[in-house]
Amino acid sequence: MGDQIAKGEEFERKAEKKISGWSVFGSKHEDAAELYAKSANHFKLAKSWDRAGSVFVKLSNCHLKSDSDHEAASALVDAAICYKKTSTEAAISCLEQAVGIYLNMGRYNMAAKNCKEIGELYEQEEKIEKAISYLERAAEYYEHQEASSSANQCKQKVAQFSAQLEQYQKAIQVYEEIARYSINSNLLKYGVRGHLLNAGLCQLCRGDVVAITNALERYEDLDPTFSRTREFRFLSDLATAMDEEDVDKFTSIVKEFDSISKLDSWKVTLLLKVKQTLKDKELEEDDLT
């Protein structure tokens, strides 16, 4: 490893000497870029991630000076890959710069891909609001390229995180939007019931039984087959239990559904919130009697 670091340092010195000198033939930035690339790769082999990342940033700057925007953005992505080993903040900074370059080039698909990655890094850091912001941008850029499936993947994450932040109305709107798009696709229409189930669970969390009933009617109009599904009956039965303020009935309905279709942790968390709300109402009524 020491040998690789020494080689990395040597190529970095040569690159910087090249930039500070005069160039009669060719471009000194192009020559320096070649040296920086060698330097960065030696630092990578030594697993000296911060130094590799910093050299990739220098490489990106050389490419920008040579009007090689695509190579500049690629070098920033390489820098981010290195920085992810040591500093999420530094990785995000490099990806943000890459996004800016790709947008200037009109490469919306690449901008979307890197925005999505930034969102995922913020998710790892549990900075959910920032994750939502970048995933929304990714979805917008994917839609600009008519990459609707990729856009919907990002939107599903946006809805999921919005519900976690108790922004239920926003989550509902996104899930319903995805369902409306999916119903017209032969490949995606079989996932509609899942999107409507998620939207319905968010409706339950809002605690308005009338709104839930109205939503189920809308979902029947959107997908006439939905009323014949287990998901529809599940939501309808839960709404009834909520209206009756029957905690035991609510619990029984959830257990029965889960025994056939395993509920994931996100759905369980929402259902537990609804159940707790019912319990709190029950305690309030007991205190009044």
Image: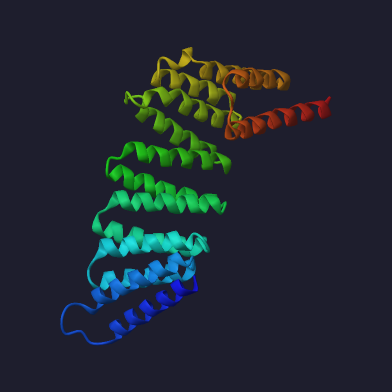
The x, y position of residue 39, in whole percent, is 38, 72
Query: Please, is residue 12 above or below residue 249 in the view?
Result: below
**Could you say which is closer to the camera, residue 118 or residue 167?**
118
Out of 85 and 72, give the one closest to the viewer: 85
Instruction: Point out the residue furthest to the bottom here.
Output: 21
Residue at horizontal 30 percent and vertical 86 percent from the top: 20
Q: Residue, x 49% and y 59% (percent of image)?
A: 84
For this rendering, which residue is in front, 67 or 5?
5
Q: Is residue 79 rendered to the left or right of residue 275?
A: left
Rendered view: 266 above or below 189: below
Could you tell me which residue is drawn at 39 percent across and 66 percent down?
41
Would residue 79 appear left or right of 125 to someone viewing this image? left
**Going by the image, does 225 lie left or right of 246?**
left
Kindly indicate the quadrant of the structure image that contains residue 102: bottom left
Snapshot colouring:
rainbow
Residue 110's x, y, as percent?
Answer: 32, 52
Q: Nearer the viewer, residue 63 or 229?
A: 63
Residue 272 visible to the viewer: yes
With respect to residue 173, does 98 lie above or below?
below
Say if residue 96 shows up in the picture: no
Residue at the image point whose x is 53% and y is 20% from the top: 213
**In the picture shown, does residue 85 fall above or below 146?**
below
